[in-house]
C-alpha cells in the first residue's frame, strides 16, 4: 500500500496548466461577484432619483445586500466543508446572478432591498469558497500571489460595472446594468462539470477515484496505483466542531483579531464602493467624472492586490498588511483635501490599492492561517463577522452625507478604521501547532 500526502504533493508542485485553468474559473467567478457588488454603487444616484429616496434610506437599501453577504459567508462558507466546495460555489453563482437581475425589475425600495438581500447570500458565500479553493490547490511558494491574482477579478468586476454603467445607465436606465448581471447564471453547469472538488473534502470522504484523476494534472510524476491511500498533512483539525476549531491550538486571539481586521477593512471598502460616486458628485464632479473615480479606485485595487500578494510571498504577510492598512488611513484622509485633479486621481488609486487590495491580501492571510479541514469555515466566519462592518458603512456614511458635513470629515470617518485594522493585525501571532502543523503565512514560524 502506498500512502500519498496530498497536501505535500500540492505544496511542492510547479505551476501548470491545471493551476492556470483553476485560476481562470475562480477569477471569472470573482469578476461576476465584483460586478454584482459594485453595480449598486455605480447606479445609486440614478436609483435615488428614480425611486425618490433620501441618502439615509439609500444606505439601508445598499446594506440589505451586505446583510445577505454576512449570512451567506457564514452559512455557505461553513456548509462547503460538509457538502463540498463546487456545489456551494454553483449555488452562490446562481443566487447572486438571478437575484441581482431581479433587482433590476423592481420599482420599490423594499422590493429592491429584498432582491439584493437574496443576491447578497451568493455574493458573500462565494468569496470564502473560492479563496479556500485557490489556497488549497496553489503551490506553497506562490500561494499568496495566486489568491490575490484571482481576487483581482473583484476589481475587474468593479471596473466592468463602471464601464457598463457609463455606457448604459444614461441611455437605457439603471435597470439595464442589473439585468446584465443575470448572464453568468448560464455558466453554472460548466463550472459544476469542470471545477475540481476540494481535496480535503475528497480525502475526508475517501473518494480515491476522483483524487487519482485530479493529482496527475497537478504533478505529472504521480502515476495512480490501485493500492494508493490518501491523507492530508494538516489533518489535526478535521475532527470536532469546525467553529470550535477556529479557536483551538492557539488560534483564539488570532481569530478574534482577524475578525476585527475584516470588520474595519470591509467598512472602508463598502463606504468607498457605495458613496464615492455620490461624494464626488456632491463635490462638483459630473456623473461621468465621478464614475471615472470608481474606475481608478478599482484599478488601484487590482494593482494593490497583485502587488500585495507578490510582497506577501517574499516577506511576512502580516507586516505587508500592517503597512497597507496604514496607507489606507493616510490616503483616504487626504481625499477630502482640495488638491489638483491629477493628485486626487493618485490618492483615489492608492485608496483602492490599500482598501480593496488590502482586503484581498487579508483573505489570502486568512486562507493560510487556518488548516485545510476548516479553511472555508474560518474564512467564512471572518468574512461573515466582517460583513457587519460592510453593513454599517453605507448607513453611517449615509447619515453623515445627510447632515451635509464638510467633505473632509466624511473621508476621515472612512479612514479611522484603517488605523484600528492595522493595530488588530499587530496582535495576530501565527503558531505552528504540533498536531495540525499550520505553516506561517510568510513561510516561517512567527516567533511568539
Image: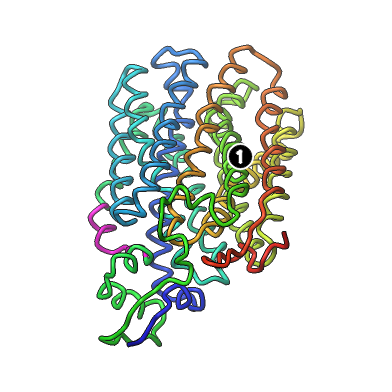
Percent x, y for residue 239?
40, 59
Boundaries of the magenta span: 188-198
Quadrant position of residue 278: top right
Residue for point 30% across, 23% down? 106
**Image-based side of 6 in relation to 213, left or right:** right
Q: Majority secondary structure of the magenta segment? A: helix
Would you say residue 178 is visible in this rendering?
Answer: yes
Image quarter in which the C terminus is found: bottom right
Quadrant position of residue 94: top left
Image quarter in which the N terminus is found: bottom left
Q: Judge whether residue 145 is colored magenta.
A: no
Are there few (<14), some (14-19), or many (20+) residues within 10 Å of tag 1?
A: many
Compare residues 101 and 165 and report the one nearer the observer: 101
- Display coloring: rainbow
Compare residues 160 and 409 and report the one nearer the observer: 409
Percent x, y for residue 217?
36, 77
Q: Secondary structure at mark 1?
A: helix
**Image-based side of 116 in relation to 163, left or right:** left
What residue is shown with label 1?
260
Quadrant position of residue 443: bottom right
Percent x, y for residue 67?
43, 30
Amino acid at each position: 500500500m502506498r500512502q500519498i500526502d496530498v497536501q505535500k504533493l500540492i505544496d511542492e508542485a510547479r505551476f501548470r496548466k491545471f493551476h492556470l485553468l483553476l485560476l481562470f474559473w475562480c477569477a471569472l467567478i470573482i469578476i461576476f461577484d465584483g460586478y454584482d457588488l459594485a453595480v449598486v454603487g455605480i447606479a445609486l444616484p440614478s436609483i435615488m432619483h428614480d425611486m425618490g429616496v433620501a441618502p439615509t434610506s439609500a444606505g439601508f437599501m445598499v446594506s440589505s445586500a451586505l446583510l445577505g453577504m454576512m449570512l451567506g459567508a457564514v452559512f455557505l462558507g461553513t456548509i462547503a466543508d460538509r457538502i463540498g466546495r463546487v456545489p456551494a460555489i454553483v449555488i452562490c453563482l446562481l443566487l447572486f446572478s438571478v437575484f441581482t437581475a431581479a433587482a433590476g425589475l423592481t420599482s420599490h425600495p423594499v422590493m429592491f432591498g429584498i432582491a439584493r438581500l437574496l443576491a447578497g447570500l451568493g455574493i458573500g458565500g462565494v468569496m470564502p469558497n473560492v479563496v479556500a479553493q485557490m489556497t488549497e490547490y496553489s503551490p506553497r511558494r506562490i500561494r499568496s500571489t495566486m489568491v490575490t491574482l484571482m481576487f483581482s477579478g473583484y476589481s475587474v468586476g468593479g471596473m466592468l460595472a463602471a464601464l457598463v454603467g457609463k455606457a448604459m445607465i444614461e441611455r437605457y436606465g439603471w435597470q439595464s446594468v442589473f439585468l446584465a448581471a443575470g448572464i453568468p447564471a448560464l455558466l453554472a453547469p460548466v463550472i459544476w462539470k469542470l471545477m475540481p472538488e476540494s481535496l480535503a473534502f475528497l480525502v475526508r470522504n475517501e473518494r480515491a477515484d476522483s483524487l487519482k484523476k485530479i493529482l496527475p494534472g497537478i504533478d505529472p510524476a504521480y502515476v495512480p496505483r490501485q493500492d494508493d491511500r490518501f491523507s492530508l498533512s494538516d489533518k489535526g483539525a478535521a475532527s470536532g466542531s469546525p467553529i470550535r476549531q477556529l479557536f483551538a491550538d492557539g488560534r483564539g486571539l488570532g481569530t478574534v483579531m482577524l475578525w476585527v481586521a475584516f470588520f474595519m477593512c470591509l467598512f472602508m471598502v463598502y463606504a468607498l464602493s457605495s458613496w464615492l460616486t455620490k461624494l464626488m458628485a456632491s463635490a462638483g464632479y459630473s456623473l461621468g467624472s465621478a464614475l471615472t473615480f470608481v474606475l481608478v479606485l478599482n484599478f488601484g485595487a487590482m494593482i494593490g492586490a497583485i502587488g500585495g500578494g507578490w510582497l506577501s510571498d517574499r516577506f511576512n504577510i502580516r507586516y505587508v498588511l500592517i503597512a497597507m492598512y496604514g496607507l489606507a488611513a493616510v490616503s483616504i484622509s487626504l481625499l477630502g483635501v482640495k488638491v489638483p485633479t491629477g493628485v486626487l486621481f493618485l490618492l483615489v488609486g492608492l485608496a483602492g490599492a490599500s482598501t480593496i487590495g488590502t482586503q484581498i491580501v487579508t483573505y489570502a492571510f486568512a486562507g493560510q492561517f487556518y488548516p485545510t479541514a476548516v479553511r472555508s469555515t474560518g474564512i467564512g466566519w471572518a468574512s461573515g463577522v466582517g460583513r457587519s462592518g460592510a453593513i454599517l458603512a453605507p448607513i453611517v456614511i449615509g447619515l453623515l452625507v445627510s447632515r451635509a458635513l464638510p467633505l473632509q470629515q466624511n473621508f476621515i470617518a472612512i479612514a479611522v478604521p484603517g488605523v484600528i485594522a492595522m493595530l488588530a493585525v499587530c496582535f495576530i501571532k501565527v503558531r505552528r501547532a504540533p498536531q495540525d502543523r499550520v505553516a506561517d503565512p510568510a513561510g516561517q514560524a512567527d516567533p511568539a
